Image (cartoon, rainbow, N blue to C red):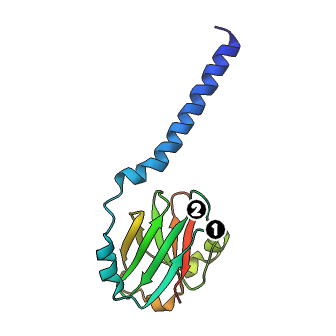
Amino acid sequence: MKKRTVALLLATHCIAGIAGFAAGIYALPILIAPPSPSTAEVKAMTSQAMFTGQFRRDLKDSDALHWGEGTVSVGPDFVTLMGKLAPGPDYKLYLSPEFVETEADFNRLKSTMVRVGDVKTFENFVVAVPAGIDPAEYTSAIVWCESFGQFITSARYR
């Protein structure tokens, strides 16, 4: 075989391998996600909410692959979303004393935030607030991808 043919085969196989790996990272969270809570379940939880806010797609660090939209309801025992998130791995829900919409702001303020729990579904979610966390002490809910250090979305709820 000619050197050019070998180089072309090697390059195309590497590109295909990288594309397959990237597609797997994107698809795996979707494939292993548990069933989303129904609209009725989320509505039942939101009846206890003290605050509400909106996840929006137009935040500074949101983009085509990292976004959220819908109504966030925050109560003493649960934080719920009636809406959608872009699929991704290892999402965490944080409460912050300040509204943030960039990775830089998140990293700067992370020490003042509290991690509430894992977000495992991408359409609607219910995350239990652990004992000892008072959502009234914070102003914003943030979804963050822990594995890749990526800002997904946030909402000011008070």
Count the numbered circles shown. Answer: 2
Q: Which of 48 and 133 is in front in this view?
A: 48
**Residue 130, image x, y percentages:** 36, 81
Residue 64: x %, y % from top left: 59, 57
Could you classify mark 1 by the number of other residues whose Cα lies within 10 Å: few (under 14), some (14-19), or many (20 or more)?
A: some
The residue most toward the top is 1
Tell me the amino acid under the disc marked 1.
Glu
Q: Label 2: few (<14), some or many (≥20) within 10 Å?
A: some
Label 2: which secondary element = strand
Tag on residue 150?
Answer: 2
Residue 154 in the figure: left or right of residue 60: left
x and y, in percent, of residue 151 in the image: 58, 66
Residue 22 x, y percent position in the rendering: 53, 44
Quadrant containing the N terminus is top right
Marks 2,1: beta carbons within 8 A: yes
Q: What residue does disc 1 label?
A: 103
Identify the residue at horizontal 60%, vertical 81% (top origin): 99
Q: Earlier in the sequence, mark 2 or mark 1?
A: 1
Query: Is 27 located above or below residue 147 in the figure?
Result: above
Residue 128 occupies quadrant: bottom left
Question: What's under tag 2, amino acid-wise?
Answer: Gln
- Which residue is found at the position 63% from the left and 68% from the top? 103
Q: Residue furthest front?
A: 39
